[in-house]
Image (cartoon, coloured by chain):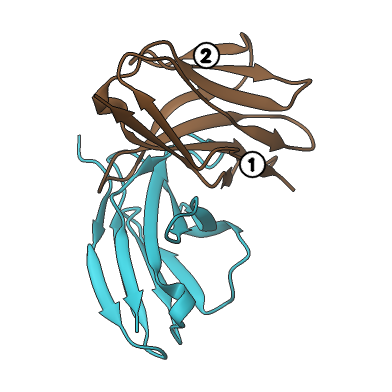
Amino acid sequence: AQSVTQLDSQVPVFEEAPVELRCNYSSSVSVYLFWYVQYPNQGLQLLLKYLSGSTLVESINGFEAEFNKSQTSFHLRKPSVHISDTAEYFCAVENNAGNMLTFGGGTRLMVKP
Amino acid sequence: ETGVTQSPTHLIKTRGQQVTLRCSSQSGHNTVSWYQQALGQGPQFIFQYYREEENGRGNFPPRFSGLQFPNYSSELNVNALELDDSALYLCASSLGKHTGELFFGEGSRLTVL
């Protein structure tokens, strides 16, 4: 069975500072990994995904995540955050049947001016 | 293109009652998944429907049941409500049954008193 651990429940950071949100997973066979973002009072939105190929994946708004098989990690990074990045971020892994995502507990990113 | 819509957005029930939540999938999507998100936690998979058939179920009791209609909209029914059923219920649609790229609605917040 898959599991996802997000090591930090809250990450406070000042605007324009870099940030890393940590995610570790366990999975038996193939690994498809995702980061979703949930802005206040909204549903989840896909931020980026790793299916295969390059281990570094990027989103359109400056986030990137690196798949590290040896460390079973998929940490999310951004070199310079904005106030608008304040949200809850969820890491997820897809099961082998491809019909279910297992989510971590989430990390609340709080960007301060 | 119409996104995923859910109704009602908020509702309050008492223990032992039954509830039906509804979801309209994004245009062109034939798969609907339901997730339960308790306060301060990540979403947990309830079940998935693909072309009107259940295609996977998470660790939820049989009093959680669902339907998918020919237009791919879906219902989640919960019988004999318990206090722990209080949560945000998220519906997500996708194209095909093997994908982690889900498009979520904003959810139905259920409070059980």
Say which chain tag 2 marks. Answer: A
Q: Disc 2 and disc 1: Cα gap in Å?
A: 19 Å
- Which mark is in front, 2 or 1? 1
In the rendered image, residues at marks 2 and 1 fall on the same chain: yes
Q: Residue at x 73, y 30 (%)?
A: A30
Q: Earlier in the sequence, mark 2 or mark 1?
A: 1
Query: Along the horizontal axis of the image, is A11 left or right of A23?
Result: left
Colour representing chain A? brown
Which lettered chain is shown in cyan? B
Query: Along the horizontal axis of the image, is B23 left or right of A73?
Result: left
Q: Which residue is mark 2?
A: A57
Q: Amino acid at mark 2?
A: Val
Q: Residue at x 30, y 19 (%)?
A: A15
Report the disc number at residue B90: none
Question: Which class describes the residues within 10 Å of circle 2: few (<14), some (14-19), or many (20+)?
Answer: some
Whole-percent x and y of residue A70?
A: 79, 20
In this orientation, does residue A29 appear?
A: yes
Q: Which residue is mark 1?
A: A4
Compared with B49, A68 (above or below) is above
Tag 2 secondary structure: strand
**Quadrant the N terminus of chain B occupies:** top left
Question: Which class describes the residues within 10 Å of circle 1: few (<14), some (14-19), or many (20+)?
Answer: many
Query: In which quarter of the view is residue B113 placed?
Result: bottom left
Q: Nearer the viewer, residue B99 or A5?
A: A5
Q: Residue at x 24, y 41 (%)?
A: B3
Check contact, mark 2 vs mark 1: CB within 8 A.
no
Whole-percent x and y of residue A80?
A: 36, 12
Q: Amino acid at mark 1?
A: Val
In this orientation, does residue A50 appear?
A: no
Whole-percent x and y of residue B111?
A: 33, 74
Q: Residue at x 52, y 79 (%)?
A: B63
